[in-house]
Image (cartoon, grey):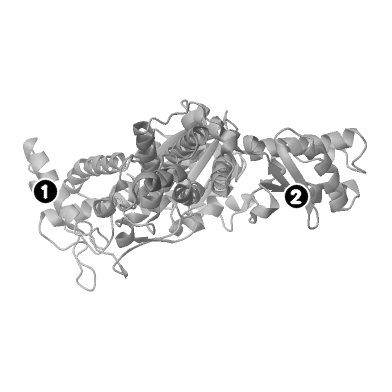
Amino acid sequence: MSPEALSELIFNIANTLVSEGKAGTLTADLIPPQAKFAVMRPKDRAHGDWASNAAMQLAKKAGMKPRDFAELFAAELTNADGIKSVEVAGPGFINITLDSASAAAVVDAVLEAGDTYGKNDHLGGETLNLEFVSANPTGPIHIGGTRWAAVGDSMARVLEANGAKVVREYYFNDHGEQINRFAKSLVAAAHGEETPIDGYKGAYIDEIAKRVIDEANADGVDVLSLPRVDGGADQDGNPLGEGDSEQREEFRKRAVPMMFDEIQRSMKNFRVNFDVWFHENSLYSDGEVDQAIADLRARGDIYEKDGATWFESTKHGDDKDRVIIKSDGNYAYFAADIAYYRNKRHRETNPADVAIYMLGADHHGYIGRMMAMCEAFGDKPGENMQILIGQLVNVMKDGKAVRMSKRAGNVVTIDDLTDAIGVDASRYSLARTDYNSPVDIDLNLLSSHSNENPVYYVQYAHARSCNVDRNAAAAGITYEGADVSLLDTTADGEVLAALAQWPALLREAGDLRAPHRVAHYLEDLAATYHKWYNVERVVPMELTDPEARGEQADAIRIAKAPEPARAAARLKLNDAVKTVIAEGLDLLGVTAPDKM
């Protein structure tokens, strides 16, 4: 019997007690939904397999003492199939012990469902637009964007496992000053000049500049001979780069697509596949910025002041109003944000019921204006728009911070990380920590084959379960004759309980937008499995004492060999663990090796 089945049973008992007039002043309308009746694993196994505080939740509404109300639940639970015993403890906890067959039923449930075990459709009917990474196309993906790639894609997989339709989206900031600075940096590099003080540095700038020149030459364009206006220097003599020119525009139009291609390649190699690659510039070229402003103006949220156009965001909870068209006629950056949200909600293909933005720590100040804009369009902040803020990543090696990339200057890029520890370790280590918390990536640890390395520890559990299968096949052990009620040892019980908790954990990870909970679950399951492996056998152990002979050797082998029905049951338990670990790793975009 699963925790969900127990929760449903307790919910039904509460309603039965009300209908039979045994629940005091409690009425049916005061009983919370089934999901509110939590069934937990006691820390002390002496307290049973599962525990519920349902009686304490409802006692006040019933006008009864919690322990007295708990006794009513216990009496009903004791008569339920699959329950061995029920005990009321403490202030009113209900401790439940299952019979061995009921506890072990999860094994067949896992094996029957396969990699769909725990998956559900409770988010079905919703289209979630999940925008993540969205780094400027002015350089390689840095470590912060790499974290969002790991977390975002894992989150998308978890949400899909809960039935949601997820649109993975990457927003290319290909409009505005960032691109101007990128183009100026390329032109300076092409001429062998110092990088402009507001420009981009790194060997990749020289690489892209050379590629632009080579591509232009192949097209018959001498890009370096195009008109160029020297921007001069500031008061300290620092070069400012060129101003507007044909040369800069030629570099821009050729270099930006090159960076697009590189970013897309990096994402694909990192096992992240986006459904939509959205270009900011299209919002201007297609007139969507003007249309969004017109919509807000019609709603009474736009006004003119000091020659500029303002969004009256304070009407919707922001700390100040926001300029969207400057007095010089240029659009403020926020104008594109307004148009982009409107586009997500009203596009013809897969309009978003929920627009989820995954932003870096430096975007915390954007939340107020974004939520105000959401409300101004008639939507519900926190529901139709959700903003997740990620924290910083520190890459460590030999106890010291790693800051330098040979290619990109004073940053660590996605390629630097995967070259050092591989895609599996990179994705797992970045996704296993709550994005609300800073994370340290220890390159030494994550490249080691030790139990301290979390991704190795989990993958090794899967590889070990595959090895058990191979040994079982060699020994002629199959599922035939399996009796799961024989999975009655303490070690068996711990593994069974861990498997039973997966469906609730997966649902919770989706609802809380918390893929790191999947990683933590996998590590707990792996730990439980490794302990089980060390004390229980599927296949008899080989003789380890070379001095043992004859009857003595046979006695050792017999002592280590479980009876056939128990061996077959343990093989099924082994395979159930293998199934759930593989499923969980896949949700994190990590492989499940069969050998290590």
Which of 522/532 is in front?
Answer: 532
User: Percent x, y for residue 339?
Assistant: 47, 40
Q: Would you say the residues marked 1 and 2 are in contact, meaning their CB atoms lie under 8 Å apart?
A: no
Q: Which residue is mark 1?
A: 210
Looking at the rendered structure, the kind of residue marked 2 is: Asn
Q: CA distance from mark 1 to mark 2?
A: 68 Å
Quarter containing the N terminus = top right
The numbered mark, 1 or 2, whose residue comes first in the sequence reads 2
* Amino acid type at mark 1: Lys
The extreme bottom residue here reads 236
395 and 176: which one is in front? 395
Residue assigned mark 2: 53
Can residue 280 be seen here? The reply is no
Q: Is residue 369 above or below residue 570?
A: below
* Dot in front, 1 or 2: 2
- Residue 258 rendering spot, x and y as whole percentages: 21, 42
